[in-house]
Amino acid sequence: MRSIQRESTVEGATIVALGSFNPAIFQPYWFLEHQLLPKEEVDEADVEIVHRDATSFQAVWFSFQATHQRIAIETRDASKFHPLRDLVSGIFQILEHTPVGALGLNVLRHVRIVDSEEFRVYLDRVAPASFWNRAVPSATPRTIEVRGTPTTGEASRLEIRLEPRLRVDAESEITIRVNQHYPFVGEDGIPLRSADRLLSVLADDWNSFLNSTSAMIDALLEYEVDR
Amino acid sequence: MTRNRNHNQMVGISTAGGLAFRESGQHLEAELAEDEADLILPSPGRLTADPNDSRRLSSESNEASTDLRSAKLMEVERAIELRKDWNLDWRPLRTLQQFEGKVTDVDGDSFWADINDLTHPDNPTEVVELSIDEIAIPDRSILRVGSVFYWIIGYETSRVGTIRRISEIRMRRAPLWTVHSLRRARERAAKRLRFFTDAQQEQSASG
């Protein structure tokens, strides 16, 4: 197996919680008041909207969006993956009685490819042209989605999406997204009325999720070379 | 499918991570899309909300109209889209190793800590001495014995392709203990203590 040659790599992570939230409370100074962020970062925050129906702002290293049903916090700085987890944990330690019905742990890796010809060979292993060209001339894969069994924790499913962009006259690239989904419902199928499960998953699974995802993405960027 | 009652109607959550809201009478129904897995996936789209766009929610949007015609007009005016993508920079960082550390001693310009390897969790705990200069200025005020921090070592690529080795420390921030949370913790501790002492008494009574 050979690992595809990469020119550059960027990574991001997003934690998404589905439940019943009060978006208006999540203004940046709420994070300062509860010591979840330093004043310097709160002062620099770029607020798009703070409203009873939606809050959306960007801080130095993350973006935050909340609605009544969904909170999503994203970072595009791999050095902040653990602070991201702590930030979400901090929110739900404060709002411990908030009903949370599902949690999504997400990692994204975007890779620029050195050699487009090598990338073509790689793509041919992922989605063989001999199969597709029977039906579609010059077929090129754009999105490949796979659902599997999570390798860590109590997650219900794991989804991986590959988005390759093969270009002859410009840099080729591929984006790989991994989503691990945790449903938090009781035996009666009703979402749980607290954030306890979310907090335990973030404490127990986050690091193993990051490590297993990283290994998984590395493996997906390897391909078999012709003998 | 999840439903909530409130005052507005959320007509859809984009599977691309964007959000759309629409006012509809006096009730709110929130609906998640059929496949919640799509909702969980973030998306770096390229749409950005225009701050001057009349579709944005205004502070007056809470008013509910009893007139059907005007309510329908408001449906259009009050639909908004939040940003699907931020100007948040992608940091071209290749992490070599990450540690989680716990401060055991602070002495002048340096501090001691026990560190655990997050990249290779099977590695044993190590003891290190680090300079306070390594810590970001906003974080220095929360450095004390017992503080937890993350130490990241990696390679960062600049826009022109220069690669530099980086070492960054960021202190962990946890929420303040409130009077309420302390009272609840005391109540929980008392309850557990009662559980064990009652069990012990029952055991000695039966024995």
Image: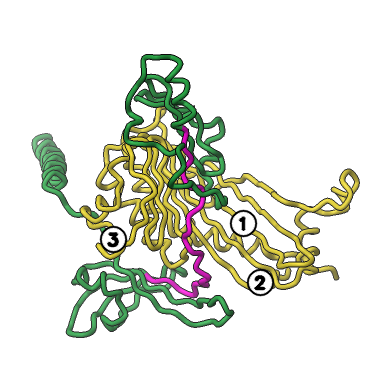
Task: Nearest to the eye among marks 3 and 1: give it.
Answer: 3
Label 1: which secondary element: strand
Q: Residue B154 vs residue B203: left or right?
A: right
Disc 2 from disc 1: Cα separation: 14 Å
Q: Point out residue A122 in the picture as x, y percentages from the top left corner.
A: 76, 63
> Looking at the picture, do discs 3 and 1 lie on one chain?
yes
The reply to whether residue A188 is in sight is no
- Identify residue type, mark 3: Asp
Say if the magenta span includes residue A209: no
* Mark 3 residue crowding within 10 angstroms, few (<14) / some (14–19) / many (20+): few
Q: Which residues are magenta?
A: B79-99
Of all chains in the rendering, the one displayed in yellow is A
Which residue is under mark 2?
A6
State which quarter of the image contains the C terminus of chain B: top left
Question: Cβ–Cβ below 8 Å for labels 2 and 3?
Answer: no
Q: Nearer the viewer, residue B94 or B49?
A: B49
Instruction: Please name the residue that numbered disc 1 is placed on.
Output: A176
Mark 1 belongs to which subunit? A
Q: Both on one chain, marks 2 and 1?
A: yes
Question: Which image quadrant for residue A187?
Answer: top left
Chain for disc number 2: A
In the rendered image, residue B151, in percent from the top left (x then y), is placed at 37, 73
Question: Which chain is mark 3 on?
Answer: A
Residue B86 among magenta residues: yes
Callout 2 amino acid? Arg
